[in-house]
Amino acid sequence: FKIREGEIITLLGRNGMGKSTTIKCVMGMLATHTGDVTFSGTPLAGKRSFEIARLGIGLVPEGRMVFPTLSVEENLVATAANRHSSSSLFDLERVYQFFPRLKERRTNMGNQLSGGEQQMVAIGRALMTNPRLLILDEATEGLAPLVRDDIWRVLGELRKAGGMSMIIVDKNLAPLLQLADHHYVIEKGRV
C-alpha cells in the first residue's frame, strides 16, 4: 500500500492478520522477509527504530508503553524534537490544548493514570516528535466511550490542520470511515 503526504489510511482486518506486524516492519522492530518499505524515498530496511523515528515517523504503540516512573510532562518531553523544522510545532502547550486532562495531571506518574489518560500521553508523546507520519496501533482499544470520542476529536483536528499523514489501526469502523481517505484490509498478511 501507499500513503501520500497529508493522507490518512487505515489498516483493517481480524486479529492475527498482520496489521501490527506490518507496523513493526515499518518501524524497524521486525525485519521484512519480502517487499520493500520506503519513507520519502528512503529505504527503511536495516534501519533501527530510532533511526526511522528520526526520519519523521511517530508511533503510538499498541499497549501505550508509557514510562511508568516518569510524570506526564516528563513522558511528553522525553522524545520531543523538531528535526524537520515543522511550521506547526507540537509543544507542551499545543498537546495540552488537545488533551486538557493531561495538563491537569502533568505531575502525576505514568503508572497513576487511567488507560485513557495513558493513551492521551502516548499520542501526545508521538506528536511531540513533530512527525510527518503518525502511526496509531489500536488507537482506541479498551477505552471508555468518552475517551474514544476525545481521541477521534483530536485525530479529526489533526486532519483539518493538514500536512501530517496517518496510518490508523482500530476496530471502530464508523469513525474511521469518516476520518480516513483510504482503507486497506489485511488478511493473512496480504492486502
Image (cartoon, rainbow, N blue to C red):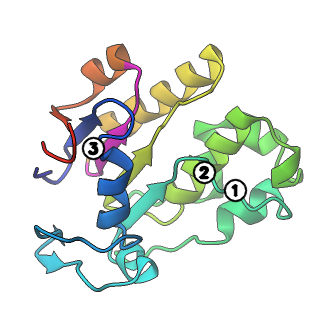
Q: Dots 2 and 3: beta carbons under 8 Å?
A: no
Q: Is residue 100 above or below residue 190?
A: above
Q: CA distance from mark 1 to mark 3?
A: 27 Å
What SS does tag 3 mark? loop
Closer-to-camera residue (50/83): 50
What residue did someone put label 1 on? 66
Identify which residue is drawn at 23% across, 78% down.
44
What residue did someone put label 2 on? 122
What SS does tag 2 mark? helix
Answer whether residue 62 is visible to the viewer in this image: yes
**Quarter where residue 23 is shown:** bottom left
x then y, percent, for residue 187: 20, 37
Magenta region includes residue 124:
no
Q: Is residue 140 above or below residue 2?
A: above
Q: Which mark is residue 162?
A: 3
Q: In the rendered structure, which amino acid carries the disc numbered 2? A: Ala
Identify which residue is drawn at 68% across, 33% down.
116
What residue span does the magenta drawing correspond to?
Answer: 163-172
Horizontal side, residue 88 vs residue 77: left or right: left
Horizontal side, residue 5 vs residue 162: left or right: left
Q: In the rendered structure, which amino acid carries the disc numbered 3? A: Gly
The mark lying in front, picked from 1 and 3, is: 1
